[in-house]
Image (cartoon, grey):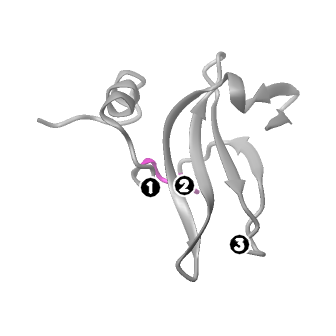
Amino acid sequence: MKATINGKRYDTAKCEELGSYDTYNNGNYSGTVTLLRASNGQLLVWADTNGQDCFRHDYLVAWDSSDIRIDSFDLTPEQTKRCAELGLIEVIS
């Protein structure tokens, strides 16, 4: 998906995926929300929906941590390491 945010053009295909979570409507999979990092360092949230939920739609916006907390995203071990490198999370052993 491509979108212009604050005068800059972003393409999800060219962004780094930092984490994601699936959304459901009445127990049916309805899409995925993904935290992305663009090459300029901008953090983005991309919702890719499948139409199962009439109230959800596709979007690509700048990430607002007060709207969607980092805790919401499922992180692989590699994504956890990358998020720690970027200062988004702190890993406690």
Disc 1 residue crowd, few under 14, some 14–19, many 20+, Cα 10 Å: few
Secondary element at tag 2: loop
Q: What's the magenta bit mostly, secondary-structure-wise?
A: loop
Q: Which residue is mark 2?
A: 68
Name the spot of residue 74 as percent of width and height, x first: 40, 49
Position of the N terminus, as image quadrant, is top right
Q: Amino acid at mark 3?
A: Gln
Image quadrant where residue 53 sits: bottom right
Q: Viewed as shown, does residue 74 lie left or right of 67?
A: left
* 49 inside magenta stretch: no
Mark 2 Cα within 10 Å, few/some/many (few <14, many 20+)?
few
Instruction: Looking at the image, tell me whether mark 3 or mark 2 is earlier in sequence order.
Output: 3
Give the extent of the magenta segment: 66-70
Residue that appears at 39% across and 31% down: 79
- Viewer-nearest of labels 3 and 1? 3
- Measured in 3D between alpha carbons, the distance from the residue under mark 1 to the one under mark 2, in whole angstroms, is 7 Å
Which residue corresponds to mark 3? 52
Lower sequence index among marks 3 and 1:
3
Where residue 72 is drawn, which disc sits there? 1
Kind of residue indicated by mark 1? Ser
Q: Determine which quarter of the picture holds residue 83.
A: top left
The C terminus: image quadrant = top left
Q: Do the residues under discs 1 and 2 have CB atoms within 8 angstroms?
A: yes
Q: Residue pushed farthest bottom?
A: 26
Residue 2 position, x and y percent, is 83, 34
In this view, the residue in front, 45 or 77, is: 77
Q: Is residue 2 left or right of residue 65?
A: right
Q: Which numbered disc, 1 or 2, marks the residue closer to the eye?
A: 1
